[in-house]
Image (tube, rainbow, N blue to C red):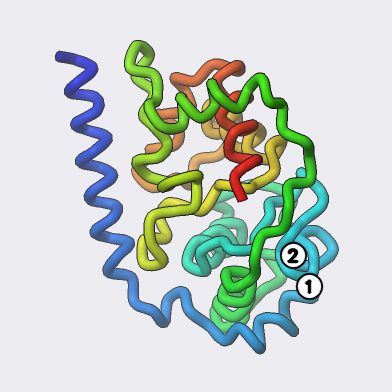
C-alpha cells in the first residue's frame, strides 16, 4: 500500500506539472531561430555550432525544448542551478535567451559520441520503462517519453534526454541524488535519483545515450 501511495503521489505531481507547463505562453519560450543562430556563437565552444557538443562535460542542446533551455539559462543566471556554464550568466536579455533556445531546439541530434556498452542497454531500457517497484524508482518513460524524446513541445518541464551524453546524464543524476542540483520542479528528479544505485544510474544513462 505504501508503494502504491508513493506512485500515486508521483503521478499527481506529474499531472500537475504537465498542466502548469502546458499553460506557458509561447512568448515565454519561443524566439527567432534565425537571430538565435547568430547569437548561439557564444555557446559554440562548449555546446557546438548546432548544439551537438562533443565534450561530455557540456550537454547536447540540439533538439532540446526551447522552453527547457530558457529555464536552465535563467536558473544559472539566478543562482538556482550551479555549474560551469559561465556564458549563461552573460546573456542579459530574455529575447536573446529565447532566440538561442529556439535555434537549438530546431537542430537535429547527430550520432552518439561514445560507443554504447551492449551489456548495459537491456537493463537500462527495463529500468527506463518500468522503474524499480521494490525500491520505488519511478519509470523514466512516464515523464520523458518514448526513448527519452520528451512528451510534447508544450510540455517543456520534462526535457529531451534521449541521445544525451552518457557521462553527462550520470553526473546530473548523481547531483540530483546528492542534492547539489535542486532546480527540478517539485523535487521530482531528486526523489527518484535518491532511490537509484550507481549501477542503475549507469545502466539508464547507457540506454539513453544510445537513443537518437
Q: Which residue is mark 1?
A: 42
Q: Which residue is mark 2?
A: 87
Q: Position of residue 106 (x, y in %)?
A: 59, 73
Q: How many marks?
A: 2
Q: Position of residue 42 (x, y in %)?
A: 78, 73
**In this view of the protein, which residue sits in the foreground, 57 or 138?**
138
**In this view of the protein, which residue sits in the foreground, 17 or 211?**
211
Can see residue 17? Answer: yes
Can see residue 78? Answer: no
Q: Position of residue 79 (x, y in %)?
A: 58, 54
Work out whether mark 1 precedes mark 2 in sequence or the reverse, and give the earlier one. 1
Quarter location, residue 88: bottom right
Q: Position of residue 202 (x, y in %)?
A: 63, 24
* Mark 1, secondary structure of its residue: helix
Instruction: Decide if residue 106 is on the left or right side of residue 27.
Output: right
Q: Dots 1 and 2: beta carbons under 8 Å?
A: yes
Whole-Å distance between the Cαs marked 1 and 2? Answer: 7 Å
Q: Residues within 10 Å of mark 2 (few under 14, many from 20)?
A: few
Instruction: Decide if residue 49 is on the left or right side of residue 163.
Output: right
**Which residue is at 61% across, 57% downward?**
76
Amino acid at each position: 500500500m505504501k508503494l502504491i501511495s508513493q506512485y500515486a503521489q508521483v503521478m499527481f505531481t506529474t499531472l500537475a506539472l504537465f498542466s502548469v507547463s502546458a499553460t506557458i505562453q509561447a512568448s515565454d519560450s519561443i524566439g527567432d531561430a534565425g537571430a538565435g543562430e547568430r547569437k548561439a556563437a557564444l555557446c559554440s565552444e562548449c555546446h557546438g555550432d548546432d548544439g551537438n557538443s562533443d565534450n561530455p562535460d557540456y550537454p547536447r542542446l540540439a533538439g532540446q525544448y526551447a522552453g527547457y533551455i530558457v529555464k536552465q539559462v535563467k536558473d544559472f543566471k539566478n543562482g538556482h542551478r550551479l555549474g560551469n556554464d559561465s556564458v549563461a550568466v552573460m546573456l542579459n536579455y530574455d529575447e536573446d535567451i529565447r532566440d538561442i533556445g529556439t535555434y537549438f531546439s530546431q537542430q537535429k541530434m547527430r550520432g552518439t559520441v561514445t560507443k554504447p556498452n551492449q551489456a548495459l542497454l537491456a537493463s537500462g531500457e527495463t529500468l527506463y520503462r518500468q522503474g524499480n517497484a521494490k525500491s520505488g524508482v519511478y519509470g523514466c518513460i512516464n515523464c520523458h517519453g518514448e526513448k527519452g524524446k520528451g512528451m510534447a513541445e508544450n510540455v517543456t518541464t520534462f526535457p529531451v534526454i534521449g541521445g544525451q551524453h552518457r557521462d553527462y546524464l550520470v553526473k546530473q543524476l548523481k547531483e540530483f541524488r546528492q542534492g547539489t542540483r535542486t532546480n527540478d520542479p517539485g523535487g521530482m528528479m531528486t526523489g527518484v535519483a535518491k532511490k537509484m544505485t550507481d549501477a542503475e544510474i549507469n545502466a539508464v544513462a547507457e540506454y539513453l545515450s544510445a537513443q537518437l
